[in-house]
Amino acid sequence: MILERFINSGHWICIIVVFTIAGTSNAEIATFDDLVLSPESYWNGSDESGGFTSGGIYFNNNYDPVWFSWDGFAYSNITDTTTSGFAAQYNAITGAGQGGSPNYVVCFVGWSSLPTMILNTPGIVDGLYVTNSNYAYYSMLYGDAFAKKFGGETGGDRDWFMLTIKGRDANGVTTGTADFYLADYSFENSIDDYIVDTWQYVDLSSLGIVKSIEFALSSSDTGDMGMNTPASIAIDTIVCRPTNTQAGPYTEEGISGYIDPNDGRRDAEPDEPNAIVNPIFRGWAAEVVDYHQTAGVDPQWSDPNKALGPVTGNSYDIFSLGELSREQINQGESQGWITVTFDESVRNVKGYDFAVFENGLISSQYDPGKGIISGELFAELAYVEVSSNGEDFTRFPSVSLTEQSGNMWSTTEISKVYNLAGKHPNANGICTGTPFDLSEITNNSDVISGLVDINDIRYVRIVDIPGSGDFYDEALMHIDPDTWPAWDFYSNNHPIFDAWQTYGSGGFDLEAIGILEEQEYSADINLDGIVDQSDLDMLESAWNTHFGQPGWIGRCDLAEPKDLFIDDSDLEVLNAQWLQTEQWRY
């Protein structure tokens, strides 16, 4: 059943929104918060510049100085949600951008040309958020001098307001379209009728590789002059992936710190009403054994006990290891580190064994001169070591393929980093930790000799890595092109770069370390405790990719032995485990 559904389905909607936005490692994200506005104001193109750029995407604008009118795109930070009519054309009905951000874009379809956004480089637009403007919302809700009240006086009229998004390639050829209803009164039961008044995600990945995207609006309420419903909407948080970005092969998912058990167990922000700590965690760091913090850390980040207990997603609930300066590195001073222990041992079970939470955040800015790339992570990385006796520590093999020199602004393409703590975001409403699997140190000499027992790990040590390039990774997983798909490990010495030198809370900021429950079913790709449609969606998104390609997801390589290719054998594993549930799932 699942095999047939996978092969014959022509349309897929990815419900892993956190994966789409936060885990899309080589994405450009237009949030519009990089655009400067005075409070409660807007930009409508009156400077006749013809448009603006955010997140590496250009948005057109057509302003008529004779009639003081415009169409295309404008941007706004107006918070008023009660004003209606033409005076509210710059107002989003939500009163803020997606996720509570200040800025958003208003799109108006006028007479000159369709609103069009143009990518710097052809790529895949994963999706965007959309909602109604006050202008359109109240017109549909109550009617006005030009447009009818949706549903009519009795509520029985089958009205609708629809956004159509069309993709075009570099030659202007249409690649596909996607429709989204901003209002729909066509249901048999009128209780289901709605007008959108929150930010809603629209999946655009089906459009394929595009150079530009056009926005059009249509409505059931039309007349001799065309559509009567105001041709006005608001959009925000556009995520796209340029095809020329050199992504790395290390696209493992972060472990969600919080979930909402009442809403499909989706990842949740820690402060949401229904959010609970992810039940995949069976324990947390309980005691600080010892630590070393480098000089210069602000006192508010100097309490090591903040690294204990469950993850909070609070960027202030951290212990900073500190960061070495160039002078300190040259003098051979020790990096910052912390060793913690647990109430129960960490064991080498099926799947990942523990996860480390830093407070990295995803960049929404684009300034390549400073090394800031939108969609990448402001990361501070660290080595991870484990011990059974507190004396003999084994370090996880790690990879860093980041090539630029570090500075305090540098962002990191996380798919080029492997087995270094801090490569997953844990800030601004996204709470994920970097997972570690003890089976990866099985062949370490201390493990072979018995000094370190991977079924009785009592201590975890986190060691800061100043991102100057003076410190190195220690192993690289690679593919031998002559024996594809064979792969192995070999020792390596790539310099590690991240944001360096930062101050105040410089260096790695430890928020929490959690022990994971055993994963009985490998096809639970997103680790929510059940093998279901969301896992199938992730497998589909990585379909026919191999290790080293953009789109590859390591956890989708389900069949044993691993062949580093996502194909029918992996789908068969998922099919065999379909709807199986982990014991720890609520």
Image (tube, rainbow, N blue to C red):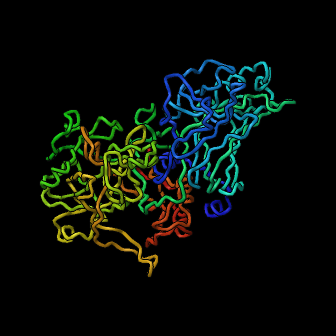
Q: Is residue 366 left or right of residue 382?
A: right
In this rendering, the answer to whether 481 lies above or below 202 is below
Q: Give me the residue at 67% from left, 50% from top.
A: 167
Residue at 55% from the left image edge and 65% from the top image edge: 571
Residue 70 seen anywhere in this rendered image of the structure: yes
The answer to whether 567 appears left or right of 267 in the picture is: right
Q: Give percent across and percent down for residue 386.
A: 22, 57
Q: Quadrant of residue 92?
A: top right
Rendered image quadrant of residue 436: bottom left
Q: How many marks?
A: 0
The front one of 447 and 304 is 304
Vertical arrangement, residue 445 with respect to residue 550, above or below: below
Q: Is residue 150 left or right of residue 436?
A: right
Q: Nearer the viewer, residue 570 or 52?
A: 52
Residue at far right of view = 224
| Residue 90 coordinates in the image, percent (x, y) | 61, 26
Quadrant housing the N terminus: bottom right
- Horizontal arrangement in the rendering, residue 415 relative to residue 174 (left or right): left
Is residue 194 in view from this perspective? no
- Indicate the position of residue 336 as horizontal and vertical percent values: 18, 48
Quadrant of the rendering where the C terminus is positioned: top left
Which of the two residues, 9 or 301, is positioned nearer the viewer here?
Answer: 301
Q: Quadrant of residue 11?
A: bottom right
Whether 1 is drawn above or below 27: the answer is below
* Residue under the image location 45 percent in, 66 percent down: 548
Residue 437 image offset from top left, x and y in percent: 33, 60
